[in-house]
């Protein structure tokens, strides 16, 4: 058994045990409180959804690079649809939407799959950005032109470019870390998602002071500090699955959890602007795909480029 296989098994066994403990706690809480409790019901729905998501991610890890790329391609497709479905669409957006879904989305992931960093790193921020404006202009409509164009550009940038930075970690050639890049993906997702979960838990247990009541009423200063610091410590302890030292893993974890938190605020601001609570209802207890990946959207590009510039 290779060191990668051993470390992957240990990681997923650890995650499985954590979910078992969480499931038992959720079951005990539900049966101790006879009256319906929305917080406990929501917690149990989240735990059940996490079981499904961990099984799916573990299965794709088993299949290898192309399966992981395809998984995030599908996630980007759902997220892009959730983002754009909340934007006012007219017949003048037809060409821009066709380009977004049937050209930009698949092409970005094809470039990631063939490891063409020089193009997948600039395709959406430069070429797609310009082409979307051109496609919007050739329809001849000037009604809300800037708003309509910017919404599709933002949708592509957040849901396709940023999310594609997760499987793009597989393209990096790191010294003394060959064939282990899937563990970098596990590290990124685990630390950022744990930060979200722990912020929720600390907020419910100790939260008193709202951190951004107009954007996300449930987020508190106590939840923010408890979640970020605890997730960063856990990230430091996971250094053994990364090319980082203990201190490096902790500092990187702190950075990506901070960006993940701020990403969550940005996405909450967009939802409040559109008058909705969740991006969708695909995942029980979590809302839409974008509700689950909003933190990852902002953390992934930062993590990818830190690793690329300092470890490749």
Image (cartoon, rainbow, N blue to C red):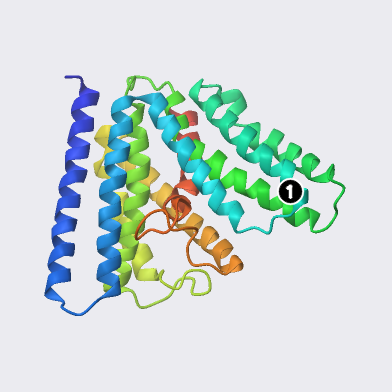
Residue 243 seen anywhere in this rendered image of the structure: no
Describe residue 265's horizontal placement relative to residue 190 as left or right: right
Describe residue 228's horizontal placement relative to residue 92 as left or right: left
Where on the picture, by quarter, is residue 128? top right
The quadrant in which the N terminus is found is top left
Q: Which of 160/297 is in front?
A: 160
Q: In the structure shown, which secondary structural element does the residue marked by tag 1 occupy? A: helix
Please state the horizontal and vertical placement of residue 46, each as a whole percent of the image.
30, 58
Residue at 33 percent of width and 69 percent of height: 203
Residue at 21 percent of width and 38 percent of height: 12
Please state the horizontal and vertical placement of residue 6, each as a whole percent of the image.
18, 27
Q: Is residue 142 above or below residue 222?
A: above
Describe residue 15's horizontal placement relative to residue 57 as left or right: left
Residue at 51 percent of width and 48 percent of height: 79
Q: Which of 250/119 is in front?
A: 119
Exactly how many numbered labels are in the figure? Answer: 1
Q: Residue furthest front?
A: 91
Q: Which of 210/76 is in front?
A: 76
- The residue where tag 1 is placed is 93
The quadrant in which the C terminus is found is top left
Residue 288 seen anywhere in this rendered image of the structure: yes
Q: Is residue 272 above or below residue 21?
A: below
Q: Is residue 209 above or below residue 252?
A: below
Where on the picture, by quarter, is residue 148? bottom right
Q: Residue furthest bottom?
A: 35
Q: Which of 196/292 is in front?
A: 292
């Amino acid at each position: 058994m290779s060191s990668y296989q051993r470390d992957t098994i240990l990681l997923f066994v650890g995650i499985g045990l954590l979910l078992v403990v969480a499931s038992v706690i959720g079951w005990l809480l539900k049966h101790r409180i006879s009256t319906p409790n929305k917080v406990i019901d929501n917690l149990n729905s989240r735990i059940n959804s996490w079981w499904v998501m961990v099984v799916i991610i573990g299965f794709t890890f088993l299949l290898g690079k192309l399966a992981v790329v395809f998984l995030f391609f599908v996630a980007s497709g759902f997220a892009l649809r959730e983002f754009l479905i909340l934007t006012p669409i007219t017949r003048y957006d037809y060409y821009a939407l066709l380009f977004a879904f049937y050209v930009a989305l698949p092409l970005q992931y094809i470039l990631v799959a063939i490891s063409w960093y020089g193009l997948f790193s600039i395709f959406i921020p430069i070429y797609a950005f310009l082409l979307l404006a051109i496609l919007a202009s050739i329809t001849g409509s000037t009604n809300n032109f800037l708003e309509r164009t910017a919404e599709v550009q933002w949708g592509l940038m957040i849901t396709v470019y940023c999310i594609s930075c997760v499987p793009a970690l597989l393209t990096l050639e790191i010294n003394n870390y060959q064939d282990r890049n899937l563990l970098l993906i596990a590290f990124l997702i685990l630390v950022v998602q744990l930060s979200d979960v722990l912020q929720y838990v600390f907020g419910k247990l100790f939260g008193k002071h709202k951190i951004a009541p107009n954007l996300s009423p449930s987020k508190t200063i106590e939840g923010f500090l408890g979640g970020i610091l605890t997730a960063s410590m856990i990230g430091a302890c996971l250094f053994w699955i990364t090319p980082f030292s203990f201190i490096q893993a902790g500092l990187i974890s702190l950075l990506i959890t901070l960006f993940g938190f701020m990403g969550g605020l940005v996405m909450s601001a967009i939802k409040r602007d559109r008058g909705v609570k969740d991006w969708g209802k695909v995942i029980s207890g979590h809302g839409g795909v974008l509700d689950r990946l909003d933190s990852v959207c902002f953390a992934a590009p930062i993590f990818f480029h830190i690793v690329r510039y300092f470890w490749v």
